[in-house]
Amino acid sequence: MLLRFSVTNHLSLRDRQELSMVASTLDDATTGLIACSHVPGSSLLPSVVIYGTNASGKSNLVDAIRWAQSAIRRSHSGREPNEAIPRTPFVLDTESQDAPTRIEFDFVAGNIRYHYGFEANDEAFVAEWLYSFPNNKRLMLFEREGMTFRFGRSLKGHNHIISELTRPNSLFLSAAAQNRHEGLATIHRYFQSIQIDLEQSVNPQSLADRLAGRNQDERIIQFLSEVGTGIVGYQVHEQEIDERSVKIQEGIRAVFKSQFGLSVPSLEPLRTRRSIKLTHRARAAENAMLEFTQESMGTQRLLALLVSVFRALDGGTPLVVDELDASLHTRACEMLFELFASKSANPNGAQLIATTHDTNLLNARSLRRDQVWFTEKDREGTTHIYPLTEFRTRKSDNLARGYLQGRYGAIPFSGRAADLVPVT
């Protein structure tokens, strides 16, 4: 479970910005809140929704989580020894370009609260730290300054050996995962479990691979039925790939091996290709089956999202979605938030973080006021993230109307389009 995430100096997020999943003291309904003994006197939010005008920085916050996860998972195994760190600091002032990017996570994994973070410049990770909080008291597991490491007594494992294997451009946590550090396995699994959905279009082959080998999830079918798609089932089919296509794949693999000296397992020639067919209710006795590509963009995206949603709900893990409302009806989005707010659907404490432009969701029954956040840029092009709870509101307020009237900021040009003067 995620408690807080903060980022400094990433894209438009120049100054430290924090997103909190800790519930406030509002007297809103508490039925959807996640109990957490690691947050004394409070609970965790099952979801948050983030609003803001175009280019205000909503997607940059999501990208910061994605970039941090990628560094944790791949900085040791997926980077050359002298390769630069692919970061994107704030570019509208020279000081920020030279300053480090800083990432921090507060989370619960294996029923223990942790605080993990790191700082990076273009060449190296200049700092990294991990603390646990047994009995709500901070305990240092490791700290890193440059290539100097300190380890706490409670972190068992080959700490010093792995620190010697850690490169300046790789995280110790990433190196520890590659070298099977059992004491940090729970931490690494937590970051692996975070799902991040940045795609508004769906790759049919990738989705078919995700669905392959799993029994048909009746929860997905029920959801699709309730939003009126007419879908009553789905199937994943496999078909053999023709020999010409196999030879093309073999040629690509040979080029990688000869030009780069790489033998890439993922480029092993595929002999079969998977596809998805969806069963629709029909007037005739037998239902009709349609290819996935024949479905609307909204149905395609909803099916892909539902696979991620139920994976998160089953595992009690975070799901981060950019532009949730893209191609989706308001009611479908509301139902997704309802799933995370349901004790029966979400018994393991999964969380949804989503950006959107759909103002109708502000009046959704399953969302508390402290689950609403905004992003807004100042005159210097810097993004600021803030919650609705910074404003005085009442449970009876029409939040959607208040937002569109500009009461909470984070809205675009509020004049009339007809008043915009054309260029002559």
Image (spheres, rainbow, N blue to C red):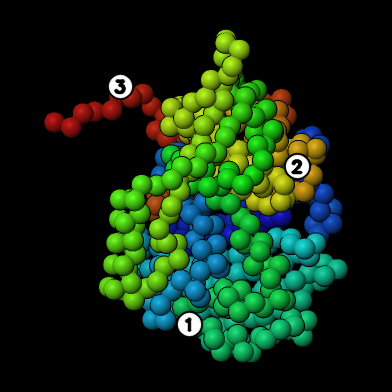
Q: Between tags 3 and 2, which lies in front?
A: 2
Q: Are marks 3 and 2 in contact (CB under 8 Å)?
A: no
Tell me residue 148's x, y (percent): 57, 88
To which residue does mark 3 refer?
418
Which quadrant would the C terminus be assigned to in this image? top left
Which quadrant would the N terminus be assigned to in this image? bottom right
To which residue does mark 2 refer?
346
Q: Is residue 247 left or right of residue 239?
A: left
**Mark pair 2, 1: CA separation:** 40 Å
To which residue does mark 1 refer?
168
Q: Secondary structure at mark 1?
A: loop
Q: Is residue 350 above or below residue 254?
A: above
* Mark 3 or 1, nearer chain start: 1
Q: At x 82% / y 67%, what residue is drawn?
A: 136
Q: Secondary structure at mark 3?
A: helix
Q: Amino acid at mark 3?
A: Ala
* Mark 2 or 1, nearer chain start: 1
**Mark pair 3, 2: CA separation:** 47 Å
Q: Amino acid at mark 2?
A: Asn
Tell me residue 47's x, y (percent): 67, 43
Q: Secondary structure at mark 2?
A: loop
